[in-house]
Amino acid sequence: MVNPLNWFLGLFSLDIGIDLGTANTLVYVRGKGIVINEPSVVAIDQKKGGRIVAIGAEAKEMVGRTPAHIVAVRPLRDGVISDFDTTEQMLHYFIHKVHERLTLRIPRPRVVVGIPSGVTEVEKRAVYEACLSAGAREAYLIEEPMAAAIGAGLPVAESVGSMIVDIGGGTTEVAVISLGGIVVARSIRIAGDEMDEDIINYARTKYNLLIGERMAERCKIEIGSAYPLPEEKTFTLRGRNLVTGLPEAVEISSIEVREALSNSVNTIVETVREALDETPPELIADLMEHGIALAGGGALLAGLAERLSQETRMPFYVAEEPLTCVARGAGMVLEDFDRLSKTLAGTERGSTVH
Ligand code: ADP
Ligand code: MG
């Protein structure tokens, strides 16, 4: 039964999809598109008992540039909510920011939040409560690979197999979906952050060069690859020589970076292969016909689709706007609720939501 009050409010309300990612948080508003896209980072003042001093882009800017007692944390770094309160406050902050920007609309939005598939019931409950306390009228949770698949335009509700590989900062999630449910799922903690780490380690062992995380990430984005490039490139790494202690710049080639990333990339390929091994043959036939979509920032790693296609003999492609798939997918569930509500996580009575 539709609650008449909710129905009435619904005429004015906002539908919001949130991607609570390990690296970035995005907020999608129906009719407006992505209105917030900020790092999932919170800056905390340890001197003042852990008081939050900044959230999002502002907090990320502070990393490495503030007194030592201010630390930047990524509360979802490994795909689990390591820090409950901080996650809640971050969610609060982003929902409120949307309110501020859209003040002419009646507030009290309906919210669908994408959560990493590994989170526990307790964590789900906490995210749900956080949405309500941040002013949501209704809140629903959806597993990120499901939201990513919807955002990538895959026919998740139909009796046809779809596969999504979502490579974020902290986790890579692989899911085979059919009839609104996840049939096969794999989640590993090897993704973009690990690739940055690979480059840091490579520079240290091969060149005695100590570089920071942001330098490593820039190098990965500019010249990183999973498959030989049509034209190999170079990038200048700047850091400190560990032997002399002096600043130093080293030119590194895309061939070296590919070598540095090879363990992480191999692990991702292996995980996809395992998921395919577990997929029932009828669904495999669907995947062969329609292809397998890559989403998340890691999908932008040059040559990843080629590499996966070559190793599995299945067709892979990068989804359109891979970084926004989860947020858009979460928002689309509200737009087409009757058809897509079966894709929500934990909708069974008593555990979460409603
Ligand atoms: P999450 O969903 O975990 O928040 P995202 O989907 O936002 O993660 O992806 C963030 C990751 O994608 C980061 O590790 C970032 O370095 C990586 N990334 C972004 N652009 C590229 C690119 N062009 N090539 C390789 N990796 C990229
Ligand atoms: Mg993500």
Image (cartoon, grey):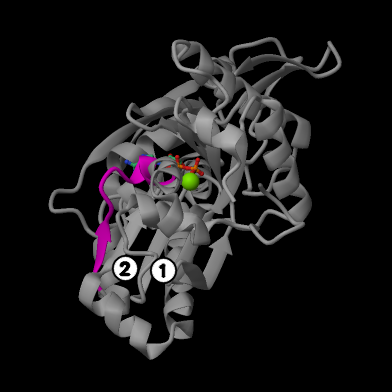
Using residue 352 as the reference point, say whether residue 167 is left or right of it. Answer: left
Can you identify the residue that label 2 sits on?
Answer: 308
- Looking at the picture, does residue 312 appear above or below residue 352? below
Q: Where is residue 133 in the image (x, y as percent from the top left)?
A: 71, 28
User: Residues in magenta?
Assistant: 315-326
Is label 2 in a helix, a strand or a loop? helix
Where is residue 340? Give x, y as percent: 44, 57
Percent across and percent down for residue 177 are 43, 70
Q: Which residue lies furthest to the bottom in this view?
A: 281
Tell whether label 1 touches label 2 (CB within 8 Å).
Answer: yes
Figure quadrant, ligand 1: top left
In-front residue for pair 339/183: 339
Say which mark, if any, is on residue 269.
1
Q: Which residue is drawn at 41% across and 68% down?
A: 269
- Count residues near mark 1 (Cα–Cα under 10 Å), then give few for <14, some for 14-19, many for 20+: some
User: Type of residue at label 1?
Assistant: Val
Residue 193 in magenta stretch: no
Q: Tell me the element at label 1.
A: helix
Furthest toward the right, the residue is: 49
